[in-house]
Image (cartoon, rainbow, N blue to C red):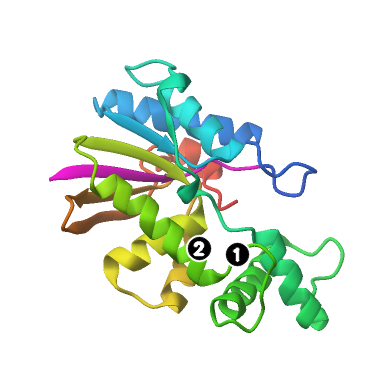
Amino acid sequence: MSELYLVRHAQASFGSEDYDKLSATGHTQSRLLGEYFKARDIRFDKVITGDMLRHKETAQGIYAHTEHGSEPGSFVTDKGWNEFDFNAVISAYLEAHPEHRPVENAPRSDWYRVLKSAMLAWSNKRITTSNEAWLDFEERVKSAAQRVYQDKSKRILVVSSGGAIAVCLMQILGINIQKAVDFNLQIKNTSIHHVYFNENSQQLSSFNNVPHLDIPEYLHLVTYS
């Protein structure tokens, strides 16, 4: 069987004007993951990213520190791996439930609780956005995953986002939306989700691992945004 290394992007710039770019911590996480792959001689036949800057910057940071070196022109872009528009989903939820809006300067955990509630409301069709329904999101992730499963490459790296990864795992494991939402909120930046696959079968081997950060000097680099 072939191998899929499904990686969440490195830490983005939460709270800044442009979330869709890596923070300084995010660039460090990407470098360390690339060094991890290099040390273990893990080489990829294909690198696929979503169409978001944080996906591409993460892949470039990883690849620059593997045996391959930096070859961003060789990456394949597949918009099917893009994240859903969480700003639109949260806005729609808070419009319906203004009493749930966190106070000014609230901790990030308050916004995570809102995101969880908003995702469940969106998936249950209790709120809608102007661009994408939950079922459309599910379907495009499924289609992107099928393109990977039909690929004949032996080892593929996909860099995506937490929501898309959670939906992909939901489809592999046959779990419900509630579990997928729970997955989404615990997926770490640059975490590895390892899958063995062929066109007809997919088996999850590991979930949410950060071996490149799992030493005392790097534990402060474990993030969720």
In-front residue for pair 101/123 = 123
How packed mark 1 is, by other alpha carbons closer than 10 Å (few <14, some 14-19, many 20 or more), is: some
| Disc on res. 132 | 1
- At x 52% / y 49%, what residue is drawn? 82
What is the residue that sits farthest to the left in this orientation? 1
Question: Residues at badges 1 and 2 in contact (C-beta under 8 Å)?
Answer: yes
Q: Amino acid at mark 1?
A: Glu
- Tell me if residue 191 is in the magenta stretch: no
The image shows residue 132, relative to residue 152, as above or below, that is below
Residue 214 occupies quadrant:
top left
Q: Amino acid at mark 2?
A: Phe
| Disc on res. 203 | none
| Disc on res. 137 | 2
In-front residue for pair 95/200 = 200
- At x 74% / y 62%, what residue is drawn? 107
- At x 67% / y 67%, what residue is drawn? 89
The image shows residue 2, relative to residue 124, as above or below, that is above
How packed mark 2 is, by other alpha carbons closer than 10 Å (few <14, some 14-19, many 20 or more), is: many
Residue 131 occupies quadrant:
bottom right
Please state the extent of the stretch shown in magenta in the rendering: 1-12
Horizontally, is 17 left or right of 60 in the view? Answer: right
Looking at the image, can residue 64 be seen? no
Residue 39 x/y as whole percent:
29, 24
Looking at the rendered image, the quarter that the N terminus falls into is top left
State the separation of the CA atoms marked 1 and 2. Answer: 7 Å
Secondary element at tag 1: loop
Looking at the image, can residue 10 be seen? yes
In-front residue for pair 218/15 = 15
Horizontally, is 110 left or right of 42 in the view? Answer: right
Secondary element at tag 2: helix
- At x 27% / y 44%, what residue is drawn? 4
